[in-house]
Every structure is written in structure tokens, then in C-alpha cells.
Image (cartoon, grey):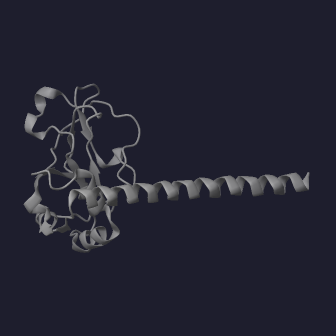
Amino acid sequence: MKTTLGHIAAIQTGVFAKPVAEGEIVYLQARHFDENGELVGVLHPDLLAEEISEKHQLLAGDILFSAKGTKNFAAIFESHNPASVASTSFFVLRLQDGSVLPEYLVWFINHPNSQNLLKGEARGTSIPSISKSMLESLEISIPDLNTQKLILKIAKLRNREKKLKQQIETLREKQIQQQIINSIK
């Protein structure tokens, strides 16, 4: 089945807030994520709870989409993360029903084909930005839940394979360098 993102998810912007030294809620910003949309480091609560509306607090399964700058990615907010809100550099996507797995939608948005399409529509000269209307009109292919799970399993295995190959290459390089050093001693 094909549909648009606007038909399967409510999309809202992140909030503008001023962080404080010690707070109760984490203010998620693009700098908290690596180029693959993975959280980096430890999150420190830096917003006061009374200053944040409950409707802006992220729920498990919410999807963050980084819409500003050159690092556009989707990431899922997981239940083990501390209470958080998204900054204005993100759109928050909240799925409307159970026909789409949040993880599948993240995979779909992060797929190179989707990324190329979105980047091609980005506007702005100094800081490219993807609009809410562009995101809402993104066409999504939605297979059945079993197929979504299989796609995610394949993607996970492929990523694991890439990491193992990288580790092998790093170890091989160390081995060769050590052999060279040993040969000149």
C-alpha cells in the first residue's frame, strides 16, 4: 500500500526553549545525534518541567525528523530515554495507527532514496530546511507488518555486517602496521 506520511502520522514542530543548568526534562537537539540518527553520550535534563506543555513531551515510539541543515535523519524516541522534548530543529511524527511500525518508518525515511527526495526539496540558502508540507506529502510504501519486520531484520543484519567488516579492516591495518614495525627493528 502507498500513502503519504501526512495520512499515517500527526506531524508537529519541536519547541523553542532556553536550557538551564539543571532541569527535569531533556531538550533534544541535533547535536545529541550522530550522522546515523543514533543518540550519542548521556542526556542531561536541562529544561524545567513547569515551562513545558505536556503535549510536547515525547512518547515512546515518537519519531524525530531533523529537518534543518544538511544532516537530515529520522530517529525513534524509546521508552528507556528520560523525559524529553524536541527542539525546533525537529518535526515530531506520531503514528496514528498500528499498521506501520515506528522502526519501519524510521528505516524508510532514512533510506537513501527518501533522503535524496527530501534533500532535493529542501529550501534555504545558508541553512537548508525541509518543510512540514513536504514531509506530509512524502509518499510511503507500507507493506504488511510481517514484511516490515523482515525488512528491519535484514537492515539490522546488514548494519551489523558493515560494522564487522570495519572492525576486521581496522584489525588488519593494525596487524600490517605491526608487521612493518617488527621488520625494521
Residue 153 image offset from top left, x and y in percent: 37, 55
Q: Residue at x 87, y 52 (%)?
A: 182
Q: Which quadrant holds the N terminus?
A: bottom left
Q: Residue at x 21, y 70 (%)?
A: 123
Q: Residue at x 20, y 37 (%)?
A: 18
Residue 60 image offset from top left, x and y in percent: 21, 40
Whether residue 33 is visible, yes or no, is yes
How many marks on residues? 0
Q: Is residue 1 above or below residue 38?
A: below
Residue 22 image offset from top left, x and y in percent: 27, 25
Location of residue 52 by image quarter: top left
| In the displayed structure image, the side of residue 69 where residue 133 appears, left or right | left
Instruction: Choose between 164 and 121: the one closer to the eye.
Output: 164
Instruction: Choose between 78 and 144: the one closer to the eye.
Output: 144
Whether residue 53 is visible, yes or no, is no
Q: Residue at x 79, y 52 (%)?
A: 178
Residue 45 image offset from top left, x and y in percent: 27, 30
Q: Residue pushed farthest right?
A: 185
Q: Residue pushed farthest front?
A: 146
Instruction: Choose between 146 and 43: the one closer to the eye.
Output: 146
